[in-house]
Image (spheres, rainbow, N blue to C red):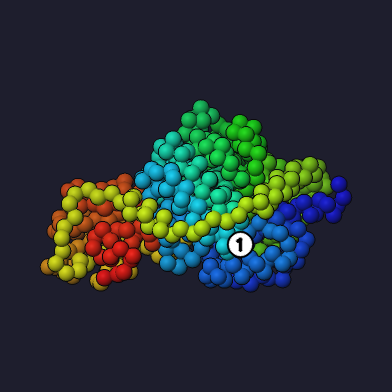
Amino acid sequence: MTGGEISRLARGTLLPGFSGSTVPRWLRDELEQGLGGVTVFALNGNVPSPEGLAGLTAEMRKSGDPFVTIDEEGGDVTRLGGHLTGSPYPGNAALGAVDDPELTRRVYRSLGAELAEVGVNLNFAPSVDVNTADDNPVIGTRSFGPDAALVARHAAAAVAGTQEAGVAACAKHFPGHGATVEDSHLGVPIVDADLALLDRRELVPFRAAIEAGTRAVMTGHLNLPQITHGVPATLSPEAITGLLRERLGHQGVIVTDALDMRGASGAIGIPEASVRALIAGADLLCLGPHEHADTVRATFAAIDEAVRTGRLAPERLADAAERTRRLKEWLAGHGAARVDRAAGLDAARRALRVSGALPGWDGSPLVVGLASTGNIAVGPTPWGLAPWASDAVHAAGTAEEAPGLLERAKGRGLVIVLRDAHRHSGQRALTTALLTARPDAVVVEMGLPVWRPEAAVHLATYGAAQANAQAAAELLGLAGPGGAGA
């Protein structure tokens, strides 16, 4: 294998990010030399609008045949315009609450159709993690639920729906991020499970996704001490080659989660993490949102050096290239589906769960939205019921705020909007103080409904997407069908 061939194969494994809504010169040059593709991020300004993204992807394809990848899960993790308004599709927790796999398939088919329209051909979804840890800071409503069998049937449906739209699905985060209480953006979470436990819990949905034909699987930066022995799964041959390739039989593409995350590269840097991931068996390397020209060149140089010194076999690069070639061949043979946004609102309405009898109000209630910190994966996506309320106020979440809010709500209804209250003591303290004086208030939980105040009327949406908010607003009388605000 010549040096030029090795260089092209090395470039073919890279999925960098870039800034802005036009193709920078360095990216055009790399695409012409065989760069594997790009990952587009809303926070980089890559998605000013769906139309803007469509123009951007068309421009990139003048210089090559790249994979254009994105994290578009619907629900709380949304990039395709939803980062500005909230997604029109509920996320996995709501779909799991409905538990209608055909509806999940329909939602993902429509989501895939929207991606295909703007030139995205590989979606980093669905998340098929079994969320068994209530305090999980990074998965939560991104999971279909805590039951492996439920997650498995919806993983298969999501994969099928996405790929019916001509977009490759990518099941994540292998071997499963649901039992962790640490964010892999910030460290290396531990999954304390032996192979027997993984087989009956974490791996069940991945098997279902593979059997459904998922074209790709994404690794998570997870330490499984009994399997990977302290090494993150993304860099572990035992996880990638041993578990995913050999035990589960996945023969499609393996993509890394973003290598800028501390869980992968915090101690060794992105170029070295890239080399180790390729040695472990990964085919495509997602570098991260901020890893632009300099990181691409440094990573390319590290891969080239690893081949020259014998750390990385040229055959491993050729294997990765063959798998990505087959994926592009599959993409070329699949057509698009029809966008069906009604599926999103239908799912959000069916996911609503009410405990207690909703009150009737004279006039408009005061809607109080409580502060909720997100995480790096979710980002600053808007949420809440304020767009549908004639009088809404934001509260930081302290019991000391209660008197002023009660005065403002005097003589009318009160709606308290939470998000993952089980993870925010301030939300619980303020809600308890408000309910002490106003037991007739309605509590709306837009995250996971783990904490429920006693005796309160409680509405769970299982997500904070625009679709979830609209469905809740309709039920509360804040909006009529179709979403008109009060």
Image height check: is 133 above or below 288? above
Rendered residue at 15%/60% (across/down): 360
Q: Which residue is mark 1?
A: 119
Indicate the amino acid at tag 1: Gly
Examine the image and state in which quarter residue 301 appears.
bottom right
Image height check: is 246 above or below 263? above
Q: Is residue 481 left or right of residue 287?
A: left
Q: Residues within 10 Å of mark 1 (few under 14, many from 20)?
A: many
Rendered residue at 62%/38% (across/down): 250
Q: Is residue 474 left or right of residue 123?
A: left
Relative image position of residue 41 (x, y in whole percent): 56, 62
Q: Can residue 162 be seen in the rendering of this structure?
A: yes
Q: Is residue 128 left or right of residue 7?
A: left
Rendered residue at 61%/62% (across/down): 119
Label 1 SS: loop
Quadrant (top left/top right/bottom left/bottom right) for the C terminus: bottom left
Q: Can residue 122 be seen in the rendering of this structure?
A: no
Residue that protrudes farthest toward the right in the picture:
2
Relative image position of residue 483 (x, y in whole percent): 33, 66
Relative image position of residue 314 (x, y in whole percent): 80, 44
Residue that protrudes farthest toward the left in the picture:
411
Relative image position of residue 161 (x, y in whole percent): 51, 49
Rendered residue at 50%/52% (across/down): 109
Image height check: is 199 above or below 424? above
Residue nearest the observer in this picture, 348 or 38: 348
How many marks are shown on the rendered structure? 1
Residue nearest the observer in this picture, 285 or 229: 285
